[in-house]
């Protein structure tokens, strides 16, 4: 069989004969033999709208970086990976669409919360802090600046919105959704993953400002699912030039958000096409995050 063309841009998969389940903002999901096939496409969403212009390599960065972190931190908690290379024979005709961007995973019962950990004051956390001095009910010291490093990382869960935006909730709110024992477990695991990932990333030139995790259950066993510490689920800041008191440049789609703000888009679908320079710059940021964290270029 010929080698797959890894420079293929995949905005939407088409796998005839494979049981299609769902198309999310970024991932296409299929059922293969009772297991979950997660394909990270090159789609990009901004302000909860999927844009018409794909970002080359984005899906491969998300998958390969997730695999890197799942492997590095496998001793903290089991994850859902079955394989990312040895796929069933019925997928062979679709190698160009799936190679390098796909994980075959265990099916789990996903928890109905996003497990967000913040080590720095940014995004919705900065907005909440300015309004109340708290994030998700956690009181913080007065006088902190935007992008300030917090005294210690905090667990700030949110709901999983089926439409619109997720909403921050308190730890008690998480307890009401999943129970006290499980809430304590995911808080502990989330904070440990964050601490270890942040300690790994910083000497490699990247500050992990915040990130979100998803977990599921297989029976009573807690499993780390979805993606792991990617530019889509995390704020990665360049350590060089970090300065509290302002927003920081980041290795993610912020470049696209800034462009959309500049052109005055109303943030309603359909989204506008992205110009080639914005696409190229965003692609470069995703690839650079991968290179700095893993120590090698995306193959």
Image (cartoon, grey):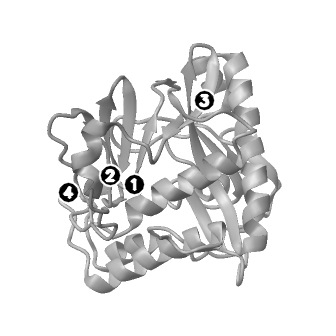
Marks 4/1: CA–CA distance: 26 Å
Badge 1 is on which residue? 101
Disc 3 secondary structure class: strand
Q: Residue visible at 36% across and 23% down?
A: 34
- Give the image location of residue 99, x and y in percent: 36, 55
Which circle, 4 or 1, is nearer the viewer?
1
Spatial CA distance of label 4 from label 2 is 28 Å
Compared with 270, 226 (above or below) is above
Give the Cα separation between the discs numbered 2 and 3: 24 Å
Vertical side of 192 occupied by 6: above or below: below
Q: Which residue is mark 3?
A: 223
Q: Which mark is residue 239?
A: none
Residue labelled with disc 4: 269
Query: How much space separates mark 3 and mark 1, taking CA atoms?
Result: 21 Å
Res. 132 visible in picture: no
Nearer to us: label 3 or label 4: 3
Q: Nearer the viewer, residue 293 or 137?
A: 293
């Amino acid at each position: 069989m010929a080698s797959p063309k890894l420079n293929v841009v995949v905005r939407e998969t088409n796998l005839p004969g494979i049981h299609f389940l769902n198309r999310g903002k970024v991932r296409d999901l299929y059922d293969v033999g009772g297991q979950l096939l997660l394909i990270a496409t090159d789609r990009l969403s901004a302000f909860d709208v999927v844009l018409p212009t794909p970002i080359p390599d984005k899906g491969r960065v998300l998958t390969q970086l997730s695999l890197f972190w799942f492997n590095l931190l496998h001793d903290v908690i089991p994850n859902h990976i079955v394989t990312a290379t040895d796929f069933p024979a019925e997928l062979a005709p679709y190698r160009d669409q799936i190679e390098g961007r796909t994980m075959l995973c265990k099916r789990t019962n996903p928890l109905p919360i996003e497990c967000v950990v913040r080590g720095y004051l940014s995004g919705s956390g900065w907005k909440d802090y300015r309004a109340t001095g708290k994030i998700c009910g956690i009181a913080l010291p007065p006088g902190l600046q935007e992008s300030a490093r917090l005294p210690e990382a905090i667990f700030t869960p949110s709901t999983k919105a089926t439409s619109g935006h997720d909403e921050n909730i308190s730890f008690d709110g998480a307890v009401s959704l999943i129970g006290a024992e499980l809430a304590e477990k995911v808080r502990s695991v989330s904070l440990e993953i964050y601490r270890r990932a942040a300690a790994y990333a910083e000497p490699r030139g990247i500050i992990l400002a915040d990130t979100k995790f998803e977990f599921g259950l297989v029976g009573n066993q807690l499993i780390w699912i979805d993606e792991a510490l990617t530019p889509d689920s995390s704020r990665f800041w360049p350590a060089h030039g970090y300065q509290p008191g302002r927003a920081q440049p980041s290795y993610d789609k912020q470049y696209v958000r800034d462009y959309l703000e500049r052109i005055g888009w109303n943030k309603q679908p359909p989204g506008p096409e992205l110009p080639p320079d914005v696409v190229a710059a965003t692609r470069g940021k995703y690839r650079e995050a991968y290179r700095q964290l893993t120590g090698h270029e995306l193959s």
